[in-house]
Image (spheres, grey):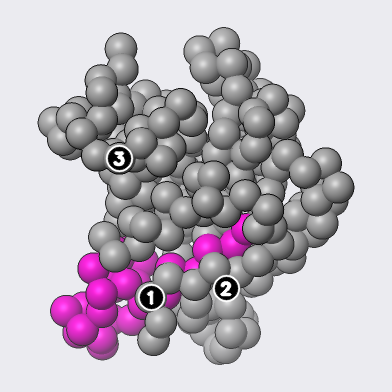
Amino acid sequence: MTKKTQGGNELAGRTLLITGAGGSLGSVAAKACAAEGARVVLLDKAVARLESLYDEIVAAGSVEPAIYPLDFTGATEMDYRELALTLEKEFGALHGLLHSAAELGVPGPLADVDLASWQRLLHVNLTAAHLLTRALLPLLAKADHAAVVFTTDSSARQNRAYWGAYGIAKIALEALARMLADELASGGKVRVNIFAPGPVRSAIRRKSHPGENPEQSPAPEMLATHYVYLLGPASRGVTGKVIEGARP
């Protein structure tokens, strides 16, 4: 099933799960990690994007990935448990989890955020990340050392106006990550960090900054080395930190 990578081998023998793998940043992370020898499990609700990404990774001669379609909007605790059981059956352990899935919604005043939008954005951007991490912690603990990486938003995390439920979810997500890092630190097996990609060209960036010339922002590919670092052995011992990508 697995092809020999034509890239490096920094992540050889490691199994990584990437949520939002069909997105601008998730796909960069997936391709970078697969090229470094990792077996990447691609998770997203957009099956067509996953299939296209799978083809890209295989065509590049990287380690063949796996596809796991899942829509966080309607996912239940049982769905996350089933995912954990599938990963354990197929791979035995999990060495890394990258939370890259996100949904912006419609930016605007908090007074205009209705209940349905509030619940959906908090669920997709915060609750789903907690439930998935909780379900996978036993599998992550089976690895010699494992990494959990939560993706924040450099703009939303500044507590400024009009970021709505998405901004609140990102702020809370950072608190979740720091608390989890502190709880797991004594075990020394699972590290937890926060990644702030910065103003790179992405679908969410285009939607949240409509007046910005996207060509003035770095391409998301410049984040590849950050993902390899955060999910690989080079970041062992680093936990509870915010790692920044592109700077404004």
Task: Assign a secondary structure to mark 2.
Answer: helix
Asked whether residue 109 is drawn in magenta, I would say no
Q: Nearer the viewer, residue 174 or 35?
A: 35
Q: Which mark is residue 167?
A: 2
Give the quarter of the image for residue 85. Answer: top right
Q: Can see residue 23? A: no
Q: Which residue is mark 3?
A: 8
Q: Is residue 62 above or below residue 126?
A: above
Q: Residue 111 location, x and y as percent?
A: 61, 82
Residue at 26% from the left image edge and 60% from the top image edge: 221
Stretch in magenta: 193-220
Categorize mark 2 by other alpha carbons within 10 Å: few (<14), some (14-19), many (20+).
many
- The C terminus - image quarter: bottom left
Q: Residue 114 location, x and y as percent?
A: 59, 67
Task: Assign a secondary structure to mark 3.
Answer: loop
Give the quarter of the image for residue 75. Answer: top right
Q: Nearer the viewer, mark 3 or mark 1?
A: 3
Q: Report, in whole angstroms, how far the alpha carbon at label 3 lies from the one at label 2.
A: 36 Å
